[in-house]
C-alpha cells in the first residue's frame, strides 16, 4: 500500500501515525435547540445547575454570533411567545438574546408588542434590547410600549424581572414626563431592598436626563444659528452690493 505515488510501499501490518487538526465551530441551530429542550423540559428548580449552564452556554454562542438567520430568530420568538414550563429567568434570558441577535427586528416587533401581557417579562426584555441597538425601528409602537410600561409600574404587583424590563424601556424611549414615575419606582425598590430594580430605575432616569440635556443643547445651538442668520445675510448683501459697484465702476472705466 502506498499513501502517495512517490512514497515507499507499506506492509499491510505497518503502523501509520496521522496528526489530525480540527476546527470546532459553535453551532447556532444546536444552541437554539438547547434552549428549546430546556423550554420543553419539566420546570427547573434551583438545583438544576446542569440545564442552567447549558442555557447560559447556548446564549453565549448566540451572542458571539451577534446576528442569527431569520429562521432561527423565528424559533427564538416562538419560545418568547410560548415559553412552556421554562422558569421566568430563562424566559427573560431568551427574550433578551432574541432582541440582541435578531438582526433587522422589524419582522418581529409587531408580534412582540401585541403579545399577551402574561408574557410581559420576555417580551419587554426583547424590546428593551431592540431599543438599545436600533430605537428607530420602534417609532410606530413607542406610545403602546410606554403605556404598557407605565401600567406595569403603577398597577402590577412587584415582579423584579418585569419591572426591570419596564424601567429599561422607559429609559430608552421615555421623556421627562416619565421621571416622577421612575423616581417613585426607585424609592419603592429601596424600601423592598430590591437593589437591582433600584439601579435600573436610576439608570433610566439618568438616560432620560442626558437625552433631555442633549436636546436642550441642540435647541440652543439652533437658536444661536437662527439669530446669526440675519447678520450673515446682511453681510452677504453688503458684500454683494459692494461687488456690484466695483464691477460697474470697472466697466465704466473700460469704456472711457
Image (tube, grey):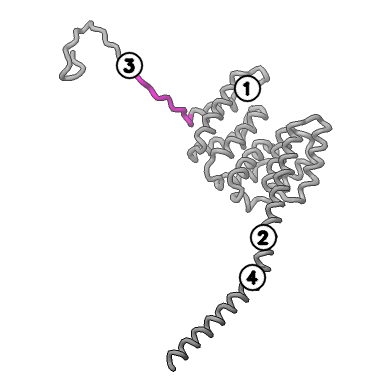
Measured from the top left, where is residue 166 in percent x and y? Answer: 71, 41
Residue 96: name its quadrant. top right
Of circles 3 and 4, the one toward us is 4
Q: Which mark sits nearer the N-terminus, 4 or 2?
A: 2
Measured from the top left, where is residue 255 in percent x and y? Answer: 43, 93
Determine the CA span between mark 1 and mark 2.
59 Å
User: For this view, does 202 lie left or right of residue 95?
Assistant: right
Residue density around tag 2, few if under 14, some if 14–19, many if 20 or more, within 10 Å: few
Q: Mark 3 highlights which residue?
A: 19
Residue 63: name its quadrant. top right
Q: Mark 2 highlights which residue?
A: 221
User: For this view, does 177 lie left or right of residue 38?
Assistant: right
Residue density around tag 3, few if under 14, some if 14–19, many if 20 or more, within 10 Å: few
Of circles 1 and 2, the one toward us is 2
Q: Which mark sits nearer the N-terminus, 1 or 2?
A: 1
Q: Element at badge 1?
A: loop
Q: Mark 4 highlights which residue?
A: 229
User: For this view, does 171 lie left or right of residue 67?
Assistant: right
The segment highlighted magenta reads 19-29
Q: Which mark sits nearer the N-terminus, 3 or 4?
A: 3
Amino acid at each position: 500500500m502506498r499513501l502517495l505515488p512517490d512514497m515507499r510501499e507499506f506492509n499491510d501490518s505497518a503502523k501509520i501515525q496521522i496528526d489530525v487538526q480540527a476546527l470546532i465551530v459553535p453551532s447556532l441551530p444546536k444552541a437554539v435547540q438547547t434552549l428549546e429542550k430546556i423550554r420543553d423540559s419539566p420546570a427547573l428548580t434551583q438545583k438544576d445547575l446542569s440545564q442552567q449552564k447549558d442555557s447560559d452556554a447556548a446564549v453565549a454562542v448566540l451572542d458571539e454570533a451577534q446576528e442569527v438567520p431569520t429562521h432561527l430568530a423565528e424559533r427564538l420568538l416562538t419560545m418568547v411567545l410560548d415559553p412552556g414550563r421554562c422558569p421566568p429567568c430563562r424566559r427573560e434570558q431568551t427574550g433578551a438574546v432574541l432582541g440582541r441577535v435578531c438582526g433587522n427586528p422589524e419582522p418581529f416587533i409587531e408580534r412582540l408588542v401585541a403579545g399577551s401581557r402574561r408574557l410581559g417579562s420576555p417580551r419587554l426584555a426583547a424590546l428593551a434590547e431592540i431599543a438599545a441597538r436600533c430605537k428607530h425601528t420602534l417609532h410606530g409602537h413607542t406610545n403602546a410600549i410606554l403605556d404598557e410600561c407605565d401600567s406595569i409600574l403603577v398597577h402590577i404587583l412587584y415582579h423584579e424581572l418585569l419591572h426591570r424590563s419596564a424601567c429599561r424601556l422607559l429609559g430608552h424611549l421615555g421623556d421627562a414626563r416619565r421621571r416622577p414615575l421612575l423616581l417613585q419606582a426607585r424609592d419603592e425598590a429601596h424600601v423592598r431592598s430590591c437593589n437591582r430594580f433600584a439601579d435600573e430605575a436610576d439608570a433610566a432616569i439618568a438616560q432620560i436626563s442626558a437625552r433631555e440635556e442633549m436636546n436642550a443643547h441642540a435647541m440652543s445651538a439652533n437658536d444661536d444659528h437662527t439669530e446669526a442668520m440675519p447678520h450673515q445675510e446682511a453681510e452677504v448683501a453688503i458684500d454683494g452690493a459692494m461687488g456690484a459697484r466695483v464691477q460697474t465702476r470697472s466697466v465704466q472705466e473700460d469704456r472711457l
